[in-house]
Amino acid sequence: MTAFDQTNAEPDRWPPRQRLTTTGATTPKTTDRPAYPQGFGRDVGVSPFLLSNLDEKCPRYIRAFTGQQRAAESFGFRNEFAMMGWRNALREWLANAHRLDSHARTAALTQTRSDALARVEHLGPDVIAVIDEMAQTYSRLCAETPLFPGGEALLARPTLLKKRNVSLAGRVDLRGIDSDGSLVLRCLRYREQSPTDRQLETELIALRLFTETNTDDDPIEAATVDIIDLVNERRHSHVITLGDAAQYARNLDDKVAQLALLADDGRARMGGHCAGCDFQIDCPALESDRPKVESSRQPLGTSRSVSRMVSTPITLSPTSVDTWGRCRRQFRNRHLLKLPTLDASSSSRFGSYVHEMLRLIHADGNRCTDRSHVTDILDTYATDERSKLATMIERHSQRCPGAQLPPRPGHSGGGTPSKTTARGGPPGQVELLGQEVSRIRTSYGLPIAFNAMARFDALWRRDDVVEARDYKTGQRLVDRVADDVTARVQAWILEPLARREGRQLIVRQEYLDPTVGDDPEPFVPDVHDFAAIGEFLSDTALDIVHERDFDGNGTPHICTWCPARETCPDRADPDTFD
């Protein structure tokens, strides 16, 4: 028995379960039950991904994943070559460097580079350059904390918590012993994590650590969990004790209780997870096209071989379709290899920050006109760009449809009703359908099946229209939203929703920078627009899955703004850059 088992962290009984009613309310069940459901997450393993953002998870997927319902067949394949090849190479490189030296110094990285990267060098110098830079970032972040080989077999497989009858999974990239003889676990991250997600990952790793190492004969007092953010050059270190693990176990109980409640519910729900779901076939939550798509293109697999770099059915997004039209090599690196952009422009980072601030401001109702609420958000998340951000929020509050809504009880926000609606008529009913909401549309027709997915900044129902808003922080590029390919993809994804609502669809781009002037003319698509967009997306998906070379664009007006232009083998002559 481990020392972790001897704590009060693993209760024999679980609190009474609750069940969702058809109205969304919860009612207590009459009987208690064992710690966790039989086989719940034991075979596959409960991971940080599965337990994060449970309010956005699909109950149908959770039920299938936990074994309470098995799908008749799996839809699509997982492309580990594209997503994991370069990550495995980087992990192997750093692990070998630790075996050669007390820590990953530049010399050790250089000595182990060739063997680790040999299997991915065919991806090109631009990919290798990004891996090189991430390895150097790792060295800078961890140079003062030597890591000696040790515990190599630890956490290689999911960890079973016997009394809970659940396995904990998740990747731990590097394991070793620091200069004080303490165990260190490191996870490499290639995108920014929210503090909540990072803490959840730390807690699950800690539970696995103490379950597998705290034995009666060889107990450990504490260990360090390192989360290394290679893109944003940050390191988050957490020293974990056995007492911490006991609290983390109680947190796990709460999370799995929510997970079990979702599994009991079992109803399908659309969300950001749909594109990678194995249970898409006949999913009632998805909006799909069953009729064949008329096209002169040959069906998938009849003439040209499919690139091994692309998983089918492919998932398109407004951004990926736009990138494909600009540069196929950038599309490959960004959307297939999932290669991070290490030198993203400051404007891009600021744009993401503005979107996050608007999400926080609207999280507790439509309170962008509530000046005290906005001030509280800015005080909490103040940056050097606060003045610019405040100006953008003020501009947004003057045009937000939510300004027509009355404030929630106890709030002073709400604003003055607009004098006209989107179609120029008198003001009427306004209802928020969702903020930062993901929607997906699937097409099973010929010549190829594909998904189209987008995340919308705001969706509104107002009078006789459904309105989608896309917040923009940069300069205006088009005079008509209809001329922006990203907006056309968004419109096609929302067409089933507007049809079901019996309302006209409008896609707007709301520019937040006051120097931009008026917003571009909104896109009001008709039936012919939807048909043309569907045909265009079908042909685009077919081109992508048959592509093998993924050559760069090579023209100055594209290469000038590409973050990978310095290392791309197909770049334009640097002397021609703007």
Image (cartoon, rainbow, N blue to C red):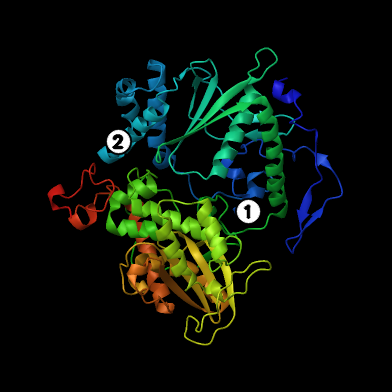
Above-or-below relation of 243 to 292 = above
Answer with the quarter of the image where residue 373 lies. bottom right
Q: Judge from the rendering whether residue 570 lies leftward or rightward of residue 71; answer left or right.
A: left
Q: Which residue is mark 1?
A: 55
Image mark count: 2
* x then y, percent, for residue 153: 54, 21
**As rendered, which of 420 and 447 lies closer to the eye?**
420
| Image quarter (top left, top right, bottom left or bottom right) of the N terminus | top right
Q: CA distance from mark 1 to mark 2?
A: 38 Å
**Residue 372 appears in view:** yes
Above-or-below relation of 376 to 110 = below
Q: Judge from the rendering whether residue 201 lies leftward or rightward of residue 89; answer left or right.
A: right
**As rendered, which of 415 and 138 lies closer to the eye?**
415
* x then y, percent, for residue 159: 63, 29
Please say if the residues under marks 1 and 2 sit with CB atoms less than 8 Å apart. no
Kind of residue at badge 1? Asp
Few, some or many residues within 10 Å of mark 1 (<14, 14–19, 20+): few
Q: Which mark is residue 125?
A: none
* x then y, percent, for residue 387: 41, 59
Kind of residue at badge 2? Ile
- Circle 1 sits in a helix, a strand or a loop, which is it? helix
* x then y, percent, for residue 121: 29, 34
Q: Which mark is residue 128?
A: 2
Q: Residue at x 47, y 84 (%)?
A: 423
Q: Judge from the rendering whether residue 421 lies leftward or rightward of residue 232; answer left or right.
A: right
- Circle 2 sits in a helix, a strand or a loop, which is it? helix
Seen from this angle, which residue lies furthest left? 575
Q: Nearer the viewer, mark 1 or mark 2?
A: 1
Q: Residue at x 37, y 56 (%)?
A: 320
**As rendered, which of 46 and 194 lies closer to the eye?**
194
Q: Judge from the rendering whether residue 103 lies leftward or rightward of residue 56; answer left or right.
A: left
